[in-house]
């Protein structure tokens, strides 16, 4: 079976050794310090700690931005991960442990240590090296972890202002009456009969809700 | 109302249903087909694995919308994660979340299918009556140029500056608020998605629609489908609740879309000699950002209203591409770059002044282009592989150059590639940077919003999965009616082609009962 035959969040287990680059089996390293704020739904405490460190590296905050820790991105992701396919959850958990076992400092300053205990600069350099790695599995792991973290962080309403985003407009849709299939089908019949020409313009007041809601 | 909508949470005991036709999947194919069958007086059961969601659920918060309305809770991708696959999953399928762009199937593609794939009987004349009816029912019409949002205006301006073809796009909308949130569910019922059009038509004519019910396996005895075995899913995590649904139809139409339809066939042992899942096409998408002096607000206004097919045909040995725009709400925007830390924050802070133009690669037309593959993992999960071969790399490279020219011609202060280390181009001379960049998997963002193929149509059972009549070769009461039958990509947004094929297939499927 080739390394690409099985998935870990579509990353193959066969690639574990490559991913860990010699660090495999060092699961006895002390775990990360970050404690979950709520009972974990999907991840082990150790995997959670690694995810928190990964999130902190992708989204360190500063310059007026909240950090991933402040927004509890790892906690939000634990809840998200709990809704994924059980096999995806297991593999994601494995990726996180492998990240931690990659002995990230070894090539940088000769002091091998788990990712979750490395300093900011080392964690950042590690992720960047994975992004550019010649090892496809490392690029895949970078993309998987980046996607999860960035989506949770930049999708958070606390970041709307930093992205110059006014937030979604409210059309009162939550209070709209339920769709009525009979009326919708009746309207369809009118259209097919040609009694209901296509519109040209939307109502003027609906044209640019952003302009109205921009602070 | 003669028909009914039953949601998974209402199903607490196993069900055993008989009917004339069972349709699996409520997207562009399954809904148009089901409406026609019900109106012809047939008894139809439709199974949809996604939930039944309407505008009341569409709060436009990306964090909720993607898990609720997209495949794999928004995480679908190729196995190496190089290509992010956006594909809908709810009652209405991708029509609930698509960006409303509608095209008739291009003549050039129909001709290619005729000459290369032997498909007779699909031409502009035979399809015309189907187009006419669909366009009326779904209110498909050109979006007025003056209502195009700034992001699309830039595309038009750039193309005009360069003397390239560009034109307003047609959209299936009525009472559109021009809000820009098509991709997370229309909040004003402006988009004429299936849950507002063909499904109501089917429901008043007697359709029994079941949401949150996943078809696990098709049971075939001899050369006939005898049953569909399905599981009720818990909507919060898509896991089986333990309640089973069995449907015993006279005829089955598989309409789960490219990727899911081939996967169900494979789960059922129906692999058509290894052809099922092969030739899966994605219209792989690359983009270039443009930073403009004035606000562009790429999160606002109809996502796509201008398109250009200037490079649709780049000669017989090259992959063509076409240009459109993409909406950028913050979560989706954050995924277009590969940056981290302060660089990512800097990128995101420019969002209001950022536009993005995209190029969609027309895959499957070159003789050596077999696209990607859908297969099953040992634990049953779906796997999509899509190798980026040299002809696609060349197209990515050419598309980057063309997009950068377009962006600068549109007046951008700077054109930005979506590479790990973005090329930042402030003038035409700077475009030469793109020559030094690498292209392909994990070099820059690649997306797919259009999934096609995997159950290719054709007259020859040795080269195709279904006949030109949509009938699975060798199983006369099994039909496939969705985007998976397309033998190549389309070179245009696929929804209308799927509506059209399904409209044409109504008589073919109904006639088999």
Image (cartoon, coloured by chain):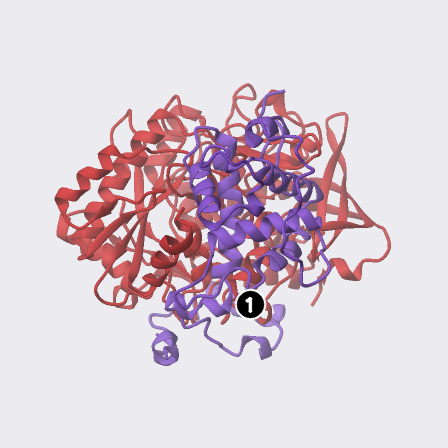
Chain colours: A purple, B red
The residue depicted at 44 percent of the width and 47 percent of the height is A121
Q: Which residue lies under the disc numbered 1?
A: B58
* Of B191 and A90, the residue lying toward us: A90
Q: Position of residue A40 (x, y in %)?
A: 71, 56
B406 left or right of A177?
left
Say which element carries label 1.
loop
* Of B506 and B362, the residue lying toward us: B362
How dense is the environment of label 1, judged by Cα within 10 Å: few (below 14), some, or many (20 and up)? many
Q: Quadrant of the N terminus of chain A?
A: top right
* Of A69 and B97, the residue lying toward us: A69
Q: Position of residue B483 (x, y in %)?
A: 51, 41
Would you say residue B165 is visible in this rendering? no
Q: Quadrant of the C terminus of chain A?
A: bottom left
Image quadrant of residue B209?
Answer: bottom right
Number of numbered callouts drawn: 1
Would you say residue B65 is visible in this rendering? yes
- Relative to B411, say whether B190 is above or below: below
A85 left or right of B507?
right
Q: Position of residue B228 (x, y in %)?
A: 75, 40
Image quadrant of residue B314?
Answer: top left
Chain letter behind tag 1: B
- Relative to B305, say whether B76 is above or below: above
The residue depicted at 57 percent of the width and 47 percent of the height is A117
Q: Position of residue B56 (x, y in %)?
A: 59, 71
């Amino acid at each position: 079976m080739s390394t690409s035959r099985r998935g870990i969040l579509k990353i193959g287990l066969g690639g574990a050794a490559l991913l860990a680059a010699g660090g495999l089996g060092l699961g006895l390293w002390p775990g990360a310090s970050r404690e979950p704020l709520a009972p974990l739904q999907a991840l082990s405490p150790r995997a959670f700690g690694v995810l928190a460190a990964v999130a902190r590296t992708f989204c360190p905050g500063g310059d007026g931005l909240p950090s991933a820790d402040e927004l509890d991105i790892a906690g939000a992701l634990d809840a998200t991960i709990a809704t994924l396919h059980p096999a995806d959850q297991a593999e994601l958990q494995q990726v996180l442990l492998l990240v931690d076992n990659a002995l990230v400092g070894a090539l940088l300053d000769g002091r091998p240590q788990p990712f979750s205990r490395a300093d900011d600069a080392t964690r950042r350099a590690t992720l960047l090296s994975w992004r550019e790695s010649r090892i496809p599995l490392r690029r895949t792991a970078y993309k998987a972890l980046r996607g999860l973290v960035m989506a949770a962080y930049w999708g958070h309403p606390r970041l709307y202002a930093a992205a110059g985003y006014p937030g979604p407009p409210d059309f009162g849709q939550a209070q709209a009456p339920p769709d009525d299939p009979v009326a919708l089908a009746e309207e369809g019949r009118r259209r097919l009969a040609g009694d209901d020409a296509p519109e040209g313009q939307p109502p003027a007041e609906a044209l640019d809700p952003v302009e109205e809601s921009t602070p | 109302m003669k028909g009914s909508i039953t949601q998974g949470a209402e199903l607490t005991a196993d069900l055993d249903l008989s009917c004339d036709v069972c349709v699996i999947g409520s997207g562009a194919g399954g809904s148009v087909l089901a409406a026609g069958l019900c109106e012809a007086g047939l008894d139809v059961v439709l199974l949809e694995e996604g939930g039944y969601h309407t505008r009341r659920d569409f709060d436009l918060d990306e964090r909720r919308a993607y898990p609720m309305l997209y495949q794999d809770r928004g995480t679908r991708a190729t196995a190496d994660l190089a290509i992010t696959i956006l594909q809908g999953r709810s009652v209405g399928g991708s029509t609930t979340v698509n960006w409303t762009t509608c095209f008739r199937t291009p003549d050039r593609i129909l001709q290619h299918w005729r000459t290369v794939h032997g498909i007779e009987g699909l031409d502009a004349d035979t399809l015309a009556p189907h187009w006419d009816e669909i366009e009326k029912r779904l209110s498909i019409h050109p979006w007025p140029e003056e209502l195009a949002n700034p992001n699309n205006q830039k595309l038009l301006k750039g193309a005009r500056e360069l003397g390239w073809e560009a034109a307003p796009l047609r959209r299936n909308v009525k009472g559109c608020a021009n809000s820009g949130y098509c991709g997370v569910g229309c909040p004003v019922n402006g988009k004429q998605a299936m849950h507002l059009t063909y499904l109501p038509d089917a429901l008043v004519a007697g359709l029994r629609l079941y949401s949150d019910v996943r078809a696990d396996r098709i049971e075939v005895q001899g050369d006939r489908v005898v049953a569909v075995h399905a599981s009720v899913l818990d909507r919060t995590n898509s896991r089986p609740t333990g309640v089973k649904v069995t449907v015993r139809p006279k005829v089955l139409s598989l309409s789960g879309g490219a990727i899911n339809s081939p996967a169900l066939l494979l789960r059922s042992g129906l692999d058509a000699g290894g052809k099922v899942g092969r030739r899966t096409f994605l219209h792989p998408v690359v983009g270039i950002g443009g930073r403009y002096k004035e606000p562009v607000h790429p999160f606002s206004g109809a996502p796509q209203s201008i398109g250009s097919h200037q490079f649709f045909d780049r000669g017989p040995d090259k992959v063509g591409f076409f240009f459109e725009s993409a909406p950028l709400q913050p979560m989706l925007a954050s995924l277009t770059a590969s940056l981290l830390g302060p660089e990512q924050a800097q990128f995101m802070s420019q969002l209001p002044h950022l536009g993005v133009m995209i190029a969609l690669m027309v895959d499957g037309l070159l003789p050596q282009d077999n696209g990607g593959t859908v297969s099953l993992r040992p634990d049953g999960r779906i796997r999509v592989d899509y190798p980026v071969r040299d002809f696609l790399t060349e197209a990515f490279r050419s598309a980057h150059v063309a997009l950068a020219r377009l962006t600068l011609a549109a007046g951008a202060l700077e054109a930005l590639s979506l590479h790990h280390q973005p090329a930042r181009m402030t003038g035409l001379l700077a475009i030469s940077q793109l020559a030094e960049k690498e292209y392909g998997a994990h070099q820059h963002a690649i997306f797919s919003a259009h999934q096609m193929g995997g159950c290719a149509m054709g007259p020859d059972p040795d080269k195709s999965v279904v006949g030109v009549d949509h009938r699975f070769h060798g199983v006369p009461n099994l039909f496939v009616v969705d985007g998976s039958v397309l033998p190549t990509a389309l070179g245009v947004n696929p929804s209308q082609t799927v509506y059209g094929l399904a409209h044409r297939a109504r008589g073919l499927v109904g006639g088999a009962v």
